[in-house]
Amino acid sequence: MKFVVSGKVKDIYDLEDGTLVFRFSDRVSAYDVKFREDIPKKGKVLCKFAEFWFNELAVPNHFVKTKSDNEIIVKKMKMLPIECVVRGYFYGSMVNRWKKGEVSVPKGTDTILAAKLPEPIFDPTTKSEHDIPIDKTKALEMNLVTDDQYTWLEKTSISIYKKMAEIADSVGFILADLKLEFGVLDGQITLGDSIGPDEYRLWPKDSFEVGKIQEAYDKQLLRDWLTANGYQKQFDDARNAGNEPVAPEIPQEIIAKMTQRYVTAYEKFAGNSL
């Protein structure tokens, strides 16, 4: 097994037989900043969720099998340089981008925080250290994908979002948005990477209320703490000054809450204990 790369939350190894091992860690990052503290059980939850979603979705994917509590084996493929974001609710970065005129929403859309959009919106980004929102014109200008590929990605990503949102609803959650990645395997566009609470926003239905910050059962819990304490602005100021942002220490209560919510979300979806 040959080490390939260590990412923000997982390490990748090449089995040199056309497959890779994804080893999920307890590491956490937010706003493109890596933190020193681990989130206990996070890697195991991400691994279990990846297996769950790849088995649930009727879309060609690169999942082969689970290797251990925090490892899956996947087929190696050429990844497309685009992150396929689907938004079902008016929330997150979309709000500020809409206020700045950088993104449009369908006519008649309720622009109150956390309002449900009339239809899910495909809102892709580049794949880089700091992802940049793009539209179809930009994606084609940058030669990220072909016209046909973009059309397929948009249609398929929205379809996957709707299926996942339906499953989430059945276990008491709202899937607010979702990030997917795809690659090309044997000439076919194939769902790849992993899918879990680092790739979507998940809200409990019983506490949902339009117009307020939602209760996060995903990585947004850490982002909300950072924003509330002024760290997001500190990160932006540091980058604007040409410096690398310094990660603050995550309070133990936030760490414990993240672990509890990640585990609770998985157990509700899977219907069994972690």
Image: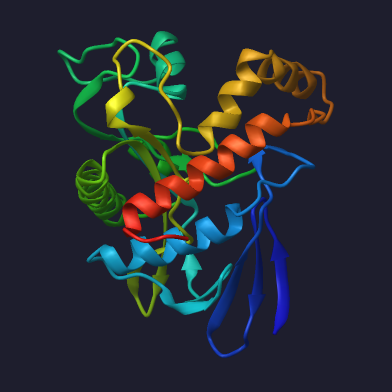
**In the picture shown, does residue 167 fall above or below 133?**
below
Q: Position of 155 compared to 234: left or right? A: left
The percent coordinates of residue 87 (x first, y second) are: 32, 33
Front residue of 122 and 61: 61
Q: How many marks?
A: 0
**In the picture shown, does residue 18 fall above or below 257?**
below
Extreme residue in the front direction: 273
Say which quarter of the image contains residue 113.
top left
Q: Residue at x 79, y 21 (%)?
A: 238
**In the picture shown, does residue 211 fall above or below 242?**
above
Q: Residue at x 64, y 31 (%)?
A: 254
Q: Position of 92 compared to 250: left or right? A: left
Q: Residue at x 84, y 26 (%)?
A: 243
The percent coordinates of residue 129 (x first, y second) are: 65, 42
Q: Is residue 75 visible?
A: no
- How is the rendered protein coloured? rainbow
Q: Is residue 4 visible?
A: yes
The percent coordinates of residue 142 (x first, y second) are: 48, 44
Q: Residue at x 38, y 22 (%)?
A: 91
Q: Position of 119 compared to 210: left or right? A: left
Question: From the image, which quarter does the N terminus lie in?
Answer: bottom right
The percent coordinates of residue 16 (x first, y second) are: 62, 88
Extreme residue in the bottom direction: 17
